[in-house]
């Protein structure tokens, strides 16, 4: 399968929040914090030019839809909608994409769907010709967020998707538009109904989204402060890593600042680590 990693806007988030209960002395060796204790994170997508006869983008990154105050708060410092440029570099454009697949609707995954912020203008969707695939449970969560993660959603987005007439809700292992080309796995530890795409069988790629945002989180006990249920997440991660090892899947990371693709190894004591398999 031919695919391209497409960088979106980076963000700078509190390092402590990204690593849950891991002590700073440890996580700061994995990702170096800046003077405000923030770590640099990617928000990237995976573009497949031809999957089941269609061009598909998995995840849109954070984009630049925020008004200036929120942009500052969430550490989105680049002025351009970086993903759009990355798609150009990959030889396509947002209006040529046939399908956009979103693992969940937190703003750092779905914000790139929206046009850049302009004062006085309502949020509007990019990707005018794409069907947008979202898991049913993740979509419901975005419509009715819990106070715990309300701030992670874009209030206007669910209605925009419904009004577009291009929303395809996904339940179960396969989506109508993708057939057998993609098998979906689900996890509830980060947010209810997080939908991870397995592209291809043996030797394929798993877009693991916020179950494992980057290499450090492949180690079982490492979770994010943002996860709603860390113990559940660890159990789910263990199960999915069994599958990853069995099928020799590569992991595709949305947030790892320096590594988009990795293989997973497990040592004699059962400790998992990620080994970079690409930039
Ligand atoms: Zn998330």
Image (tube, grey):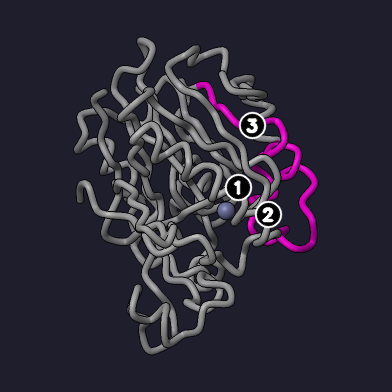
Element class at badge 1: helix
Residue for badge 2? 232
Instruction: Please tell me in which quadrant of the rendered image residue 257 appears.
Output: bottom left
Residue 255, how many percent across, how many down?
40, 56
- Please give left or right for residue 151 compared with residue 269 in the image: right
Residue 157 belongs to the span the image colors magenta? yes
Query: N-terminal of the two: label 2 or label 3?
Result: 3
Label 1 packing within 10 angstroms: few (<14), some (14-19), many (20+): some
| Region in magenta | 131-158
- Write the residue at 42% across / 62% down: 269
> Which part of the image, by quadrant, shows the N terminus?
top left
Q: Nearer the viewer, residue 130 or 57?
A: 57
Element class at badge 2: helix
How many angstroms separate mark 2 from mark 3 (CA)?
19 Å
- Write the residue at 67% across / 40% down: 193
Instruction: Please tell me in which quadrant of the rendered image residue 55 appears.
Output: top left
- Write the residue at 47% across / 45% down: 241
Query: N-terminal of the two: label 3 or label 1?
Result: 3
Instruction: Please tell me in which quadrant of the rendered image residue 174 appears.
Output: top right
Residue 124, how many percent across, how many down?
55, 39
Q: Nearer the viewer, residue 133 or 189?
A: 189
Label 3 packing within 10 angstroms: few (<14), some (14-19), many (20+): many
Tell me if label 2 and label 1 are in contact, CB under 8 Å.
yes
The label on residue 236 is: 1
When the figure is inspected, residue 78 is found, relative to residue 63, above or below; the finding is below
- Write the residue at 50% across / 76% down: 14
Residue 23 belongs to the span the image colors magenta? no
Residue 191, how many percent across, how many down?
67, 50
């Amino acid at each position: 399968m031919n695919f391209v990693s497409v960088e979106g806007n980076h963000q700078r988030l509190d390092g402590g929040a990204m690593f849950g209960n891991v002590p700073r002395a440890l996580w700061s060796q994995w990702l170096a914090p800046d003077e405000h204790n923030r770590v640099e994170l990617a928000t990237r997508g995976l573009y497949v030019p031809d999957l089941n006869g269609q061009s598909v983008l998995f995840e849109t990154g954070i984009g630049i839809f925020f008004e200036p105050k929120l942009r500052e708060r969430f550490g989105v410092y680049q002025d351009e909608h970086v993903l759009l440029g990355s798609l150009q570099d990959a030889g396509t454009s947002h209006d040529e994409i046939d399908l956009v697949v979103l693992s969940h609707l937190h703003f750092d995954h779905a914000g790139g769907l929206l046009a850049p912020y302009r004062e006085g203008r309502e949020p509007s969707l990019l990707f005018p010709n794409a069907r947008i695939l979202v898991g049913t449970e993740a979509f419901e969560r975005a419509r009715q967020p819990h106070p715990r993660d309300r701030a992670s959603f874009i209030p206007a987005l669910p209605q925009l998707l419904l009004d577009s007439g291009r929303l395809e809700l996904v339940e179960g292992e396969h989506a109508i538009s993708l057939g057998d080309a993609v098998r979906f796995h689900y996890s509830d530890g980060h947010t209810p109904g997080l939908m991870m795409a397995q592209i291809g069988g043996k030797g394929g790629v798993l877009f693991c989204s916020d179950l494992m945002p980057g290499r450090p989180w492949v180690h079982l006990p490492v979770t994010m402060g943002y996860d709603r249920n860390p113990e559940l997440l660890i159990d789910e991660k263990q199960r999915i890593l069994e599958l990853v090892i069995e099928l020799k899947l590569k992991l595709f990371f949305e947030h790892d600042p320096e590594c988009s693709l990795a293989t997973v190894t497990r040592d004699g004591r059962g400790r998992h680590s990620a080994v970079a398999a690409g930039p």
